[in-house]
Image: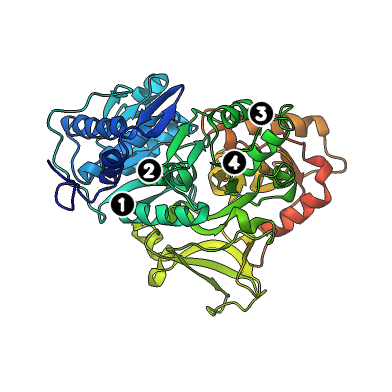
Amino acid sequence: MSVPGPLSGGADLAARVERWADRQPTATAVAFEGVEHTYRAFADQIAATAGWLAGAGVGEGDRVAWLGPNRPAALRLMLGCSWLGAIYLPLNSRLAPPEHRWILAHAAPSLLVVDAAFERHGESIGAGCEIQVLPDEPECPAPPSAPPPRRGTPAHPVLLAYTSGTTGHPKGALLDQAAMAANAVNSTHAHDLTSRDRVLTTIPLFHVGGLNIQTLPAVLGGAAALIERAFDAGQFLDDVEQWQPTWTVLVPAALTAVAAHPRFAAADLGSLHGIMTGSSPVPAAATQPFFDRGVPVGQIYGSTETAPIAVHLRCDEAAFHPGSCGKPSTMCEVRIVTDDGGDAAPGERGELWVRGPSVLREYWRDPEATADALGDGWFRTGDVGHADDEGWIFIDDRRKDMIISGGENIYPAELEEVVARSDLVAEATVVGVPDERWGEVPVIVAVRASPSTGTPDSRADDDTAADLLRLFDGQLARFKHPKAVIWLDEMPRTALGKVRKHEVKALLEQRRSAVPDDGGTER
């Protein structure tokens, strides 16, 4: 009889699933579209995936890209990569082809695995690159007779997650296996997660929020995870009533959609210990309907670079600290640093810095950005916040020029680059404005190509605005598209000529009626 140990069981993330398979082989690990995979079956599928990848030539340090919806295949690919010491690269399936091509050229994966629904898209974005484009492996691959040798260790990088960059191009945050394991510890503390829990995953697994707040920690900790292809408010209520999850994660826009569903008031939510949210400012209007139904809503604060859990507000704390995102997570240290480099006093604002084993190793092929973000081992988040006398942290603003819309990060520089290629306007900037449904949406603030004289021509402005908005078709993901064009006679600027975006936002606040409510569902 062989008993898994340090030598035979391995130290990679996949080995942790194997330990649970040995301990509770018939317990559910992952459920998907009516099929429940036991820990024994799931561990065997991971071994088969590792063998499949090795057979395709994947080895230590190689990147394996995945393009598809939420499916168990995404988890198996990541854990198969951990087995081999390879690096998993999840692609945001909502991006446009030019965005995918840039990431593939930058990350240079040896293999791109695509879901059947994305096969034509995958062939298109892989054309011209030295990348194997393979259709997805079988949904339930058979275990190999001889699994490949384990090469992965805690020190091996395992996740390359691209996050929008302030320069207009995304940055690849590289996280090692030790970071993923440390984040799982943070998740366990944030939820009191045990092997008896059941988590419902509806947010995308190509985001660290979908992958790492609950889903991966669940399967590394012996719990069960139900994966849905995509979020749907009605399906969410069905899942809660029928599958009886104990935990889930919903971004603020999804919280609002669920609470607005006609069946929300009567739905049985009794299985839920709580819901976690985050990724953008969390309005009380989004969480209160759940508190009213007896379901507390906690918060996670972090970023792709922190895997993401850096600060958390547990659900049993949430009602007592409204507006706070919590206290530093178990494996993290957090500083709030003033402009002069000192530690902020209670109530004083400063930039949040994070340090700990869950922080990224580096930005892929970007030593300058790595040095800027990781000075002295502290990750500079770019977010501004403060702590109260008891150490509860509040996020006040974002130093980085980022818009968070429906849980998705949007950087104005990327949109401004598209506008800059056009002669439709003299100059333009992009800012985020409040939106009841999505939290924030981007809008273009522009100066007319010809100086206005007297009363502006409203019809001409409308035609130009429509032409300007059409520039984004096929270039950027739909969720990034600006929702309106607002005209100014001139931009407020600093003495050095830089646009004062805070003044632009103040002007828009005064002209709120000019910004249409984005009540649509197309994203």
Mark in front: 4 vs 1: 4
How far apart, in angstroms, are the residues tagged by discs 2 and 3?
A: 36 Å
How far apart, in angstroms, are the residues tagged by discs 4 and 2?
A: 18 Å
State which tag comes first along the sequence, 3 or 4.
4
How far apart, in angstroms, are the residues tagged by discs 4 and 1?
A: 30 Å
| Category of crowding for the residue at label 3, using alpha-carbon neighbours closer than 10 angstroms: few (below 14), some (14–19), many (at least 20) | few
Q: Position of residue 295 (x, y in %)?
A: 66, 44
In the depicted structure, whether residue 295 falls above or below residue 44? below
> Label 1 amino acid?
Gln
In the depicted structure, whether residue 94 falls above or below residue 63? above
> Label 4 amino acid?
Leu
Residue at figure coordinates x 69%, y 41% from the top left: 449
Quarter of the image with the N terminus is: top left
Mark in front: 2 vs 3: 2
Q: What residue sits right under mark 3 in the picture?
A: 521
State which tag comes first along the sequence, 1 or 2.
1
Q: Secondary structure at mark 1?
A: helix
| Category of crowding for the residue at label 1, using alpha-carbon neighbours closer than 10 angstroms: few (below 14), some (14–19), many (at least 20) | many
